[in-house]
Amino acid sequence: MSLVNLGHFCSHLQNASRSRLSITSIMPSKLHLGIALALQDQGFISSVTRGDTAGPDAEETPTTRENIARRRLWLSLKYHDNEPVLSGMKLVSKPTKRVHMGVRGLENLAAGKQHDFVQSLGAGEIMLLSTDRGVILEARQAIEMRIGGLLLCRVR
Amino acid sequence: MNVVCPVRRILHISPRGGRQLTTTPPSTYRHRRSLKAKPESYTTPPPTPYTEGQVSKLSEYYTDAQLASLLAGESAVDPAHFHNRHRRPDHDPMKLRYLDDLSILDPILDSPTGPQTYTPGHPLQPLPKLQELLTPSASTTAANSATGEPPWMREVSLRTGFPVADIKRFRTKILVSHSVVNQTHMGKIRRMYCLAVAGNGNGLVGIGEGKSVEHSEAQRIATYMAVRNMMPVPRYENRTIFGDLDIKVGAVELKLFTRPPGFGLRTSQYIFEIAKCLGLSDLSARVTRSRNPMNVCKATIQALRSQKLPETIALGRGKKLVDVRKVYYNGAV
């Protein structure tokens, strides 16, 4: 699990939103796929498609040793009322410092309070965390399931 | 039925509003307590039938037929219903809440009265020309010269559409005032610069700058521009901003924080005045890096106009955004 690449993912989505791109591609790692699906679930991006460096796949293509270097994950961005829906995406855990948080801490964040040097979540802001259930969860989902995890990134 | 209530000692000072923070939401039916019938001892004494003397007194004012119907009507009313009677509201509950004052004709939106025949390809309403609006008509000049309003108020009234009476009630203040120098071939020309803020205290605010050789003229221009630049700014519950804002305008790094009711305006002087003109009552601010007054004012206005409304976020994300404070805590938090 590389937070360095996740950092690149965050920067790239912010840049793509600011440039008003409709579709953009990222490195297809398992972590990135989990984050992308969570973003789609929360309504920040509209579609997640596997594809090539050239563009998204027209039909399903298996990843093989031959084509793995060219494989990308294509995300389509959303815009509403002349503003991007995904305007900010920032790492919380950095490669130099991992930030773990339990349910109590997450409850504080969701309630608008700071906890352990992590700023609270504003209106329309989400926190994605990696849990031991093997799936990337949003903070409120994790609170419902009464589990904590490693805070990955915050999106607004 | 006596209920013994234990003595509750208040060991802390509650926030203004007085309600304790609790996770049990208050009952949605608590207003019905007032509708329940009071115990026997609190009711008004049941209406007694009129005595002979009282009836004869009444018959001085009413005819026999009226008196008979009066007494029959009063006897038909149940005393319990009479005790629980509610006064009809003075206001009209079916009245539509108009945002505009429709008693005043708008120069742009309202069409002239009279019979209008539609010809295809031509708009029914004559398209207004800006110059017509800027030059005062004969009727208005006659009226205003009599009352003696400042000409800048008249000018901005024509430009913006605010009536002069409203403009007089706007809250305006000169926030920044200093001299600026321009070096020309003729030498140094020294002028006064003023920055003013104007607002109606209820959702409109704007800032304007003015420069002139005379200080009073610069103030006048600044106030005129401020009123001209007034724009609506959304407010949460008409008292604070939506969410926390963190923006950088030039070298000014400005953080504005939304605060609970009763908090007050705990900000520096320039942000305080702008918030007062807008009609905010609860706000907190932090200005780091540059604190140049002119740029702080401009940054504040830009920040207030950059607020993201929860409805916009909800529409963009395709999700339902619920204000937990209102829905779950019923405004008690």
Image: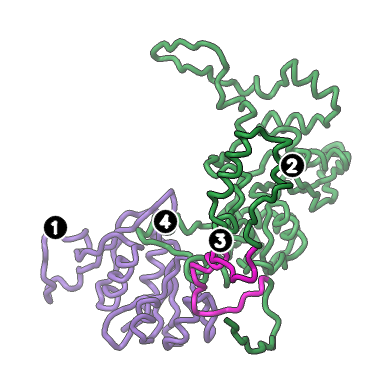
Asked whether, in this view, residue B203 is left or right of residue B53, the answer is left
Q: Are marks 3 and 2 in contact (CB under 8 Å)?
A: no
Query: SS for tag 1?
Result: loop
**Residue B77 appears in the picture as rendered:** yes
Tell me if residue B40 comes above or below residue B71 in the rendering: below
Viewer-nearest of discs 3 and 4 = 3
Viewer-nearest of discs 1 and 2 = 2
The circle on residue A84 is: 4
Q: Is the residue at mark 1 from the same chain as the one at mark 3? A: no
Shade of chain A as shown in the rendered figure = purple
Viewer-nearest of discs 3 and 2 = 2
Q: Which residue is found at the position 75% from the left and 44% from the top? A: B170
In primary-sequence order, the first of circles 1 and 4 is 1
**Residue B47 falls inside the magenta stretch:** no
Q: Name the residue under label 1.
A: A58
Any idea which chain is the green one in this picture?
B
